[in-house]
Image (cartoon, coloured by chain):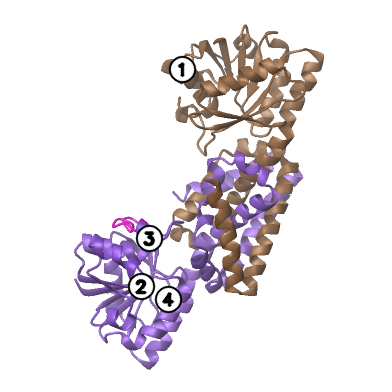
Chain colours: A purple, B brown
Amino acid sequence: MIRRLAVVGVGLLGGSVAKAARARGLAREVIGIGRDVTRLQAAVDDGALDRATIDLADGLRDADFVLLAAPVRTIEALLDRMWKDLAPDAIVTDVGSSKGAIVHKADALARATPRTFVGSHPMAGSEKAGYAVARADLFQGALVVVTPTETSEPRAVKTVTAFWEHLGARVMELDPDAHDTAVAAVSHLPHLVACALVDAVAREMPGALPVAARGFRDTTRIAAGDPQMWQEIFLANRASLRDAVAAFRRALDELERVIAAGDPAAVEAALARIKAAREALS
Amino acid sequence: MIRRLAVVGVGLLGGSVAKAARARGLAREVIGIGRDVTRLQAAVDDGALDRATIDLADGLRDADFVLLAAPVRTIEALLDRMWKDLAPDAIVTDVGSSKGAIVHKADALARATPRTFVGSHPMAGSEKAGYAVARADLFQGALVVVTPTETSEPRAVKTVTAFWEHLGARVMELDPDAHDTAVAAVSHLPHLVACALVDAVAREMPGALPVAARGFRDTTRIAAGDPQMWQEIFLANRASLRDAVAAFRRALDELERVIAAGDPAAVEAALARIKAAREALS
């Protein structure tokens, strides 16, 4: 049971955590911290927050559990700004989609002033953003990757894990850098590819758009994601992303080569291998 | 009102046409033609077909409307085999995902023996195949591209258009080659890209698969499509596909360049442009 939960950033993810914590009685008190008090008011009116503030130090006072729910670069900046305001017993986690830079920043801050941070990445985002689309059941059945390091306190890792599990999520532990490599492959690469698909068709082949059916819509849905959030992800994780794009290019090159060669059996064999890999996923 | 509708190939599309035609009273009699009489039996048992046969000439006898529902290369071969068996007043259409080769083949056959063919492409496929997933409402609200040429009889184009509209579809007319360029961009390219994504991750980064969330699943859902069907599409439409892939590579190159340059404002501007294009779609 959390005494005072502080949620910094009350959008889709932060708002959903507030709603879910309230619905499941996980915290005695939920404080929302944001930049715009009128936007925060909706969450207070809903009963998801007990109180909202735009003053970070005020919102963090006496909080024993702090969730940073902002774009990745903003989370890094927040850690710098808030570290000295954290209660010594507070446990801090976040929702950032890339973890290396955030976790290393927290480790560096902790060497000067010991405070407890364990990174999280709830894989429950959407192309929609903002408190208006927050839902108490957003984490139900979702995967949350928790990224401890060798300096993490086992008790804090357990608390963060239990936090997400109480909200209905499945938790997987990964080293922060292994996490970044993995999400580069299955999240950031598909996002970049979906963006390139939309851009290629919209700019070079716009006449084809009226013919776009479900396949195109599904494949490119994520390209409508929040530009600021994705800009920060792409830049924060650009080394792993570059490697993932290189692997993608090798796969695309090979498929193009097989198609150009024109051998139906070879094309079909490649597609059968891919179908089997895709079906193993679901 | 169709007197005798012959459906060649009773899978997802052919089976759905049979069910929809029956549900809407569009044909007095529906004959199914396939390669395996035991598989056809399910559609007879359902009442979607009045009769099933593996004998093409027998199935086509006295049919005034013929639907070819097979992979694209198979449709070309079927046109050769069946042309002489068609009733002189029959109107023939198909469901092939690329149209140039099919329509040009029918035009060539019609110069020797006048029969009436108008190409169709119902954009209502799925990664699932077979009669078991056929549905009477598959075409409800779906887009069907009809591809007449300058030699098409206006009466036949009208009949084929009315046929799909009666099944609930919206019909758009396109020249066969314009169709192939458009679907290369919004259907065949996304399919190839989804296949390359799955292949890259499965072969080079399999450790990332347990982290795959909804974004990856949606983006790659179509990669589980039928290998034979897609092999035929990729090979039949490979010239247009090559151009579409080249446009995609240009867009991907540019996005990678902007990310590598590391300017947040430039990355965000590119993503905002793409988000606007994607949102204009739905």
Work out whether B9 lies above or below B281: above
Q: Is residue A137 magenta?
A: yes
Q: Position of residue B256 (x, y in %)?
A: 64, 66
What is the count of numbered marks? 4
Q: Looking at numbered disc 1 in the image, what kind of residue is underneath it?
A: Arg
Asked whether B18 or A134 is in front, the reply is A134
Q: Looking at numbered disc 3 in the image, what kind of residue is underneath it?
A: Leu
CA–CA distance between discs 3 and 1?
45 Å
Q: Secondary structure at mark 1?
A: loop
The first of marks 3 and 2 along the sequence is 2
**Mark 4 highlights which residue?**
A75
**Mark 1 highlights which residue?**
B24
CA–CA distance between discs 2 and 1?
56 Å
**Mark 3 highlights which residue?**
A143
Determine if residue A102 is in view.
yes
Q: Residues within 10 Å of mark 3 (few under 14, many from 20)?
A: many
Mark drawn on residue A34? 2
